Amino acid sequence: IVATTNEAGRNGIHQSSSFPTAMTPWTPLGNECHEEFRIANTTKLHCGYGKVSPLSEDGHFCGGVPMIPGFCALPKRGQWKAPIAGEEIDMNDLLPRRFGRSSYQSRLQPCKSVSSFLDGRYEGESFDQEWVPSSCSSIPLDPYTWSENKCQTTITMLGDSHIRNLFTATINGFRGVRYFAEAHAGDAIKESGIVYAYEWRLYQNESAVDRLDVHLNVNQKHPDAFEPCPCGVDDVVRCLRVGFIWAPSFREQAFQMHYVTEWDSDLVIVEPGNAYERNTAVWPKWLVILDELMKENKHLHLGIVAWPWNIENVVKERTSILTNWTGPEASHSTRKSFWLHKSGLYDGESTKQGQTLWHFACSLGKEKVPNDRIQAVEPCTDQTDTSQIRGFATVHFDAFKQRSRPEDGVHENLEIRIGHSNSGGRETNTIQPTNHSRSLLGWRH
């Protein structure tokens, strides 16, 4: 049932299907939904290219997303059922190609650098195109593949709505959802702090379940986001965890960096300020904190993606600084990557995003934003973020492998100094990871 990478694959043939091919498709469990993802009677989905909206003639679908009152665009829980004896279901034939889980096999090794990954082109049918590197291969967007090497794998994302888009595309990619929408939180909610916590668990009988939790007001109340993966308990085999933290500025990201250690992260994905930092190219303390995290955890990988907002001087300087800071001469360079949103990955009409906002555009809320400011092409599939997260997973796949020693990446105390001055000099915040426990009830159907 499980086609795993064999010795031939390790020596020259990369099999992009190391996940069960006979699983049933993901299906939601119950009717639990976070309200910002639920379609109400007055909710409008904003999608379209220019002033052309992909609203179906009967008005029941927008970019493929059902316009049904009460429909949940991102259910809280779901499951993949184990195959039944004699049942023949090939998930490769059911899933969109852009997730990279089609039945073909690449004879190329996975890409090891950003430049090799970006040397490629889109292939496939319109609105379901897959980024295919020319001289290497791309890891599929698949929880089985990403978690196959160890008990617990954790990805931590920090940033604004662009990284939230990336988070949403990642979760829908894991689930194999063909069309989806993105929810926008209000300013008051964002200012109080938001954490999204997604967890996928595989069981001994090869069934799997997942859940998404949204934690609000986290600046005042510590979120009970994740517990350590209970491998070997209740037949749990392995877990894949993805967390998103709303932190758009350098200082906010620095303040929230304790989650990287607390969640025992393997890969951190962060954006460097973008439009929230129009006067500062890069805050030096931000670089110091990231380097300290990587020094303390010799397993940790870091991916940075920058959007080229119309602040030319700042973007030019920021790009230069980050290119050097992640370059071959930099510390921890083999575990760092830097991606610019200006690349072939974001070209082509079928990958169009907002000209002004660089946003995935099939969105809930934001009723006052006209279609010519938030752009997408029917259907709503977000190929660019799908390609981007596969790029991160491919270049940083070593982060998902088993650690050589238990102490690599497990730290009881990491002091992070957030440098603002007061009457006593520099204020020091000592962040200590805590093992919050959450009941296993609610995972099993």
Image: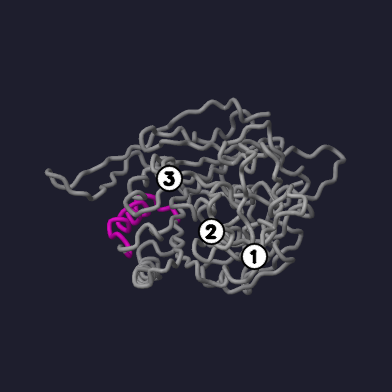
Taking the spot 56% from the left edge, 45% from the top edge, the residue there is 150
Disc 2 marks which amino acid? His
As drawn, is 66 to the left or to the right of 159?
right
**Residue under label 3:** 187
Disc 3 marks which amino acid? Asp
Q: Are circles 2 and 3 on residues that touch, CB within 8 Å?
A: no
Q: Position of residue 234 (x, y in %)?
A: 62, 28
The foreground one among 156 and 306 is 306
The foreground one among 29 and 261 is 29
Secondary element at image label 1: helix
- Whether residue 288 appears in magenta in the rendering, the answer is yes
Disc 1 marks which amino acid? Asn
Q: Quadrant of the C terminus?
A: top right
- Nearer the camera: disc 1 or disc 2: 2
Q: Residues within 10 Å of mark 2 (few under 14, many from 20)?
A: many
**Residue under label 2:** 359
Q: Residues within 10 Å of mark 1 (few under 14, many from 20)?
A: few
Cα–Cα span, label 1 and label 2: 40 Å
Secondary element at image label 3: helix
**Residue under label 1:** 11
Cα–Cα span, label 1 and label 3: 51 Å
Q: Are circles 1 and 2 on residues that touch, CB within 8 Å?
A: no
Q: Which residues are magenta?
A: 281-301
Q: How is the image coloured?
A: one colour
